[in-house]
Amino acid sequence: MPSPSPDSAAQRLTPQLASKFAAIALGHVTRPYPNKLDHVLESEADALGIQALHPVFYGSFDWHSCVHGYWLLASLLRREPGIPEAPAIRALFEAQLTPQKVAGEVHYLQRPSARGFERPYGWGWLLKLQAELMAADNHRWAAALRPLAEAFADRFSLFIPKADYPIRTGVHSSTAFAFALARDYAEAAGDIGLLVQMAHKVRYWYLGDRDAQAWEPSQDDFLSPTLIEAECMRRFLEPEDFRAWLANFLPRAARGEPRSLFQPATVSDRSDGKIAHLDGLNFSRAWCWREIAATLPPGDPTRAAAEAAASRHLAASLPHVAGDYMGEHWLASFALLALTAGE
């Protein structure tokens, strides 16, 4: 059985944490440098500055981190509208989420060399951001971002039939993670076609998987290939079907095995951007374990093991959300996923 863990009830979003996370994100979503571009030069004319290329999402070290920084702010504003940073969040969205600036982001996607831009990680996060904006009180923001969201939804629809194989990684290329996020958008937007496509594909990819060995983590993982597959399946299967699948996929989970999934990763150097990914791994594992646990009945020993593992993973990395920009520009988003999971 798993060892005792911190009280999971204390590891939830509070107004104080919401304020801290909002302040962190407000400090980087409009910070253009340092910046790691995902940009193919077709000619010298494409050697442009970051804000010329991406009028909205130019901060946070890279495009996808900026996108989920906006998701973090939108989610915090909805969940804790009374935090002191709320006026600054609204002002940011009013200034940045405009039809004109979003048109610049759409224009970037129309470049022939941008066909694979941010596939699939950035695609999933952009759609999750749009799902969050659709739940906001101010519908102008979602209306402004809608052309970009629909462009990425279209890219998913074109990509899915060609994706004969899943990408089973713990980094940005993970198909399970992208599909898990994109499902929120498909449901919120009523995009039944995309929802059906994704549901069919995840069954094709993962339904027959059995007895996962969980040879992880790799040194720069921020996702668990094993647990994110399980979380993806949870989102696309009926609860009873998911529980049956999980029993075959992780048959010894109630005993805390494979052990690698139940022990937090050690982060040896938080100033190293890739090694700092491991804090994200701890958060994303906590997120997955909490979501999985909420699907299992009370008294299920796997549920208890999952909840204990989530608490240990959160405790290991929650003190390190800020401190070095290599983690600070993105970790709060993953912390928020974990803190609000299973609600």
Image: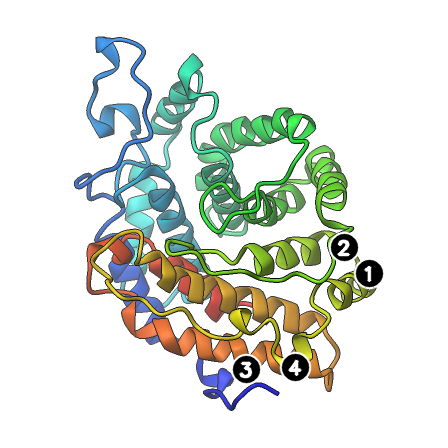
Residue at x-position 23% and y-position 50%: 28
1 and 193: which one is in front? 1
Separation of marks 3 and 1 at Cα, in angstroms: 24 Å
86 and 310: which one is in front? 310
Q: Which residue is mark 4?
A: 255
Separation of marks 4 and 3 at Cα, in angstroms: 12 Å
Residue at x-position 63% and y-position 58%: 231
> Image height check: is 295 above or below 130?
below
Q: Which residue is mark 1?
A: 241
Dots 1, 2 in contact, CB < 8 A: yes
Residue 196 in which image quadrant = top right
Q: Earlier in the sequence, mark 4 or mark 1?
A: 1
Residue 21 in which image quadrant = bottom left
- Crowdedness near tag 3: few (<14), some (14–19) or many (≥20) residues, C-alpha within 10 Å: many
Q: Which residue is mark 2?
A: 237
Q: Which residue is mark 3?
A: 308
